[in-house]
Image: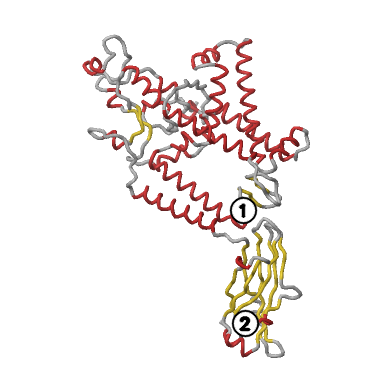
Amino acid sequence: MQTGLEDQLGLYQKRIPIFTRSVKGRFRRFKTSVLALAYAIYFLLPWLPWSRLDAPAQAVLFDLPGRRFLIFGLTVYPQDVIWLALLLFIAAILLFFVTGLVGRAFCGYFCFQTLWTDFFIWIEHKIQGERPARVRLYRQPWDREKVLKVGGTHALWMLASFWTGLTFVAYFTYAPQLVLDFFTAQAAAAAYITTGILTLSTYAAAGLMREQICTYVCPYGRFQSVMYEPETLAVHYDARRGEAAHGRAAARAGQRTLAERHEKGLGDCVDCGLCVQVCPVGIDIRDGLQYKCISCGLCIDACNTIMDSFEFPRGLIRYDSEKNLASAEPAAPKVQWKRLKTIGYGVALVLMSAYLVYSVATRGSFDRAVNQIRQPLYVVLSSGDIRNRYQIRITNKAAQDQTYVFSARGIPADALDLGNFREITIKPGHSGLVQASVRLSPAVAAKTQHFELIITPLGKPAEARSEKVRFDTPGKRQ
């Protein structure tokens, strides 16, 4: 029989429940502040009113039937896909930039998985009690207390998951009407399917799997190491101070003060285990930097609390860099940004962000494209006149119907022929095609290399746009 390490461990480890202890400190306060802000934005934004002429009064609305995204006063159409590409690029560069400076700070404070898991742990704590009570409840046989507390926890988890899913759907339709239709069985099937899928996935990810999502599902924890440098700040345990010559030891009689511990060669770590108990992924930071660590800083708060109680210096566990920790006399930790890679990320981030802001700020109310029809490139008429044909495409990006008129500069006024009309009305978010031809006499054509085609929204001369267009003749054929 053949055995191996994979037979012993398997591809997936059965989850061992983690019961975290609550802790107070600046990192816990920061995490709570971020959670409250993120939840306020996510859950309240669909209910924020915003006056619109052609859409529901909702500040943020992803109008899929209308093929547009309404974000406050900005209307985004599929033609603006370059903005999405820029946003994704900026998000990626920002992640690399932050990781190079302060490690997995995104995971610890801003990741959706972290935010929802933190909230679910808070629910569990409120119903089942502090860590010792939850451990006791987990180990005791099923009785009335366990059924009520565990059942109540899962019921609130499911309720939070349901409202998460329903809120997501509310971004795609008018939120008040959605809630009314949803609970009166009049909503679209897609609303029920999407809400159901997100309810189950949120419940499983934040309530049942928790840290396993970070360990087995999220790829970021696996490739983050390539973005770490010796100067990168991350949560570290100062082993030199904590272990000293003879390791860490509990604070018993005769080894409670720093003087007593140093005399015996003991480190400052009193081996209380609180840093492990507060860790949401269940690791021991004293074992060194690990890919499971999300750099949330809760172990720092826990350790500082213990250090304060013994009147030891803070910072046994802290944000620090490997380079500083390895130095003979570690200095105060600080962000080291003067590195080529970090500066490169920063420059790319600033340039792309500036370009995105510029693109949004200078976008006109319509897009236009003028293409010369090249089959044939030109036509010589029986009168000797030369005709070129063009296709004009206009995309209306305004919030209402818009009429556009056409004119030309650099050629005679009667040379531009648009058939039976000189204007076109286009609905918001839609495009229109206009076929145009320009007919010039041989003498004028010989002197005309280019001309300007002018497109003007009716009643808005300030928004007129022009396109420089080539005019071809037999003598200029290339």
Circle 1 crowding by C-alpha within 10 Å: few under 14, some 14–19, many from 20? many
- The image's mark for residue 411 is 2
What is the secondary structure assignment of the residue under circle 1?
Answer: strand
Residue 128 figure quarter = top right
Alpha-carbon neighbours of circle 2 within 10 Å: few (<14), some, or many (≥20)?
A: some
Give the residue at x 43% y 52%.
350
Q: Is residue 305 above or below residue 433?
A: above
Q: Position of residue 9 (x, y in %)?
A: 48, 27
Secondary structure beneath label 2: loop
Residue 291, x across and y down, in percent: 43, 34
State yes or no: discs 1 and 2 in contact (Cβ < 8 Å): no
Q: Which mark is residue 387?
A: none
The residue type indicated by label 1 comes to: Val
Picture coordinates of residue 192, whole percent (x, y): 72, 36
Q: Residue at x 67, y 39 (%)?
A: 170
Query: In the drawing, does residue 458 fall left or right of residue 30?
Result: right
- Residues 281 and 422: in front is 422
Question: What distance separates the C-alpha of mark 1 from that of mark 2?
Answer: 36 Å
Figure quadrant of the C terminus: bottom right
Which of the 4 quarters of the picture holds residue 427? bottom right
Provide the residue designation for mark 1.
Answer: 76
Q: Position of residue 49 (x, y in %)?
A: 65, 42
Counting residues from the N terminus, which is met first, the one under dot 1 or under dot 2? Answer: 1
Q: Nearer the viewer, residue 380 or 417?
A: 417
Image height check: is 350 above or below 391? above
Determine whether, in the image, residue 300 is placed left or right of residue 19. left
Q: Amino acid at mark 2?
A: Ile
277 w.r.t. 394: above or below? above
- Quarter residue 265 falls in: top left
Q: Is 195 located above or below residue 346 in the figure?
A: above
- Classify residue 125 as left or right of residue 455: left
